[in-house]
Amino acid sequence: MDVHRRTVNAAGNSLFSDKSSKSKNQKHDLQSQQSLYLTNAVFFGLFFSVAYFLLHRWREKIRTSTPLHVLTISEIVAVFSLIASIFYLMVFFGIGIIFHPFAASRTVHYDEEDESDIAKTSGLCLAGVSPTLPPLPPKISVEKVAPALVPAVILSSDDEEIVRAVVSGSIPSYTLESKLGDCKRAAAIRNLAVERVTGRSLEGLPMEGFDYDSILGQCCEMPIGFIQIPVGVAGPLLLDGKEYTVPMATTEGCLVASTNRGCKAIYVSGGASAVVLRDGMTRAPVVRFNSAKRASQLKFFLEDSQNFDSLSHIFNKSSRFARLQSIKATMAGKNLYIRFTCSTGDAMGMNMVSKGVQNVLDFLQSEFPDMDVIGISGNFCSDKKAAAVNWIEGRGKSVVCEAVIKEEVVKKVLKTSVESLVELNMLKNLTGSAMAGALGGFNAHASNIVSAIYLATGQDPAQNVESSHCMTMMEAVNDGKDLHISVTMPSIEVGTVGGGTQLASQSACLNLLGVKGASKESPGANSRQLATIVAGSVLAGELSLMSAIAAGQLVKSHMKYNRSSKDVTKLAS
Ligand code: ADP
């Protein structure tokens, strides 16, 4: 900003100081132009009058048979006057014509700002006052960068100083919040500094309308704004006798509409029901010993039921909501991977379980002093990675959701048949995925629904990996007339407290579902309910997409809802 301001001021000052000399020059130009016009007029007049006079005399001589070379004094004067006027006019216009193309070609090298000056200079050349062009500035190739924008937050001159300090590196960007004590101001300053350092515009990334204090030390470091994702609603989803309006944050056209259709099919068929089979977050540190035998001794110690009470007592000190459920240890040579599972109330629970694991490791260190803790996470947890351990053992909430969709509804709402759906499910979701070597991917598009609900409700979107593990099953029931559909999802990792759930927009979406914050009746009830809603919505999504594929509508509907009519090549920068 300062750079711009200074540029403007500098330009302004130079304009101001040059003003009087420019006005003098302008006066001078005007006077010389006036005398020029007068001279031109005189020579034009002379040219035409003497030409007329000589032609008249020539005709007279022909008529009277007088030889043409016999000239009177007046005729001699007229001939000289004609030659003089022709010479003047030739010099005046001829040079202009000769020089004009050069002048034009040379002006091409000037920047836009200089064009008016060049026009003036060219004008002077044409006037014949000075055919010499001014020296051209050296042509410098400058890579054009998007201009720095006026920030959404107007910065003071102090802020301007800080922006410059951040750009120069004398103030580290990450210290802005603590230095200024004002998160919004810090974000605005960082935003501008980023634009200047990168030379890239951040136009379109909003700054205003966000509570930057709410993310400090919890959700996002070094903020420069926030992105906007539209939130649509699908529903009502009739699940376990309750109706839910499901918020989905997505930019994929068709997704909400499709899930909505699935919700309708479930609704008119009497609703879906869900059961939570397990609820436990996991963390698995890796520890190393000098021998496999020694590592096995710790494994047996940890898995001995007689030690569980004392270990859980130590573990549970991490939080009033953390309750150790189980410890499972597996060995790789002399390395031991210890998978702790605990309930975490309404929190998704990663922090909680990590704290509990740290307590136990501290205790074990005194019992097994030769134990070398390599890492609090040894990937046997397994967080944000597709892993069979989660698919088989579960992580977070393990949920099964089912519904019976009536034959008539399959026909009228889903526009297909039970038979087609069952066959497609077997060949696509089961056999096709098996052929692909899928891990937890025995479904049509569970991750679409999981991601959209996760974004809307402030879950960790990276946990979509294992949370989307899903087996979709379809079977003809009631004498083959109706459709039984189920989704089995062993690793739905959700919370209604902590992390992004406390942010205003995400909190509003949780509120819409009636699961905002901690459950007052029973800790964990809200997050479990949210997990069932996720599974119910996945059921709706599976039902609708599978029907679209079975009916051959998929491409058609995507062309309608998921393809912009705008010319994207024009939108691309
Ligand atoms: P996570 O463990 O999912 O990362 P956090 O540790 O960020 O979550 O948030 C959990 C915090 O919320 C803890 O401090 C915990 O004491 C508090 N809390 C309040 N009520 C509940 C509840 N019903 N269930 C779980 N945690 C709760």
Image (cartoon, helix red, strand yellow):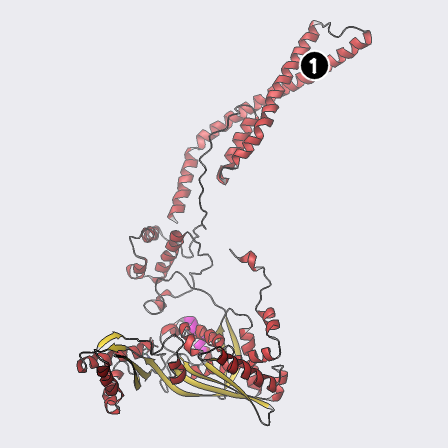
Q: Is the magenta region chiefly helix, strand or loop?
A: helix
Look at 37% across and 47% down and name the residue there: 2
Given residues 347 and 421, the one toward you in this image is: 421
Look at 40% across and 43% down and name the residue there: 7
Can you say whether 89 is above or below 251 in the image? above
Given residues 425 and 78, the one toward you in this image is: 425
Can you say whether 405 is above or below 347 in the image? below
Q: Element under label 1?
A: helix
Can residue 244 be spotted in the picture? Answer: no
Q: Position of residue 242 (x, y in %)?
A: 49, 86
Given residues 196 and 563, the one toward you in this image is: 563
| Residue at numbered disc 1 | 50
Look at 36% across and 87% down and name the residue there: 522
Q: Position of residue 550 (x, y in %)?
A: 60, 80
Q: Is residue 356 left or right of residue 66?
A: left
Question: In the image, what residue type sits under mark 1?
Answer: Val
Q: Is residue 293 left or right of residue 194?
A: left
Can you say whether 156 is above or below 321 in the image? above
- Looking at the image, which residue sits at the far bottom? 479
Can residue 427 be spotted in the picture? Answer: yes
Q: Position of residue 385 (x, y in %)?
A: 39, 75
Magenta stretch, residue numbers: 504-511
Q: Is residue 322 left or right of residue 452?
A: left
- Quadrant location, ligand no. 1: bottom left
- Binning the other alpha carbons within 10 Å of mark 1 as few (below 14), some (14 to 19) or many (20 upward) gives many
**Quadrant of residue 466 within the rendered picture:** bottom left
**Quadrant of residue 151 within the rendered picture:** bottom left
Q: Position of residue 231 (x, y in %)?
A: 49, 71
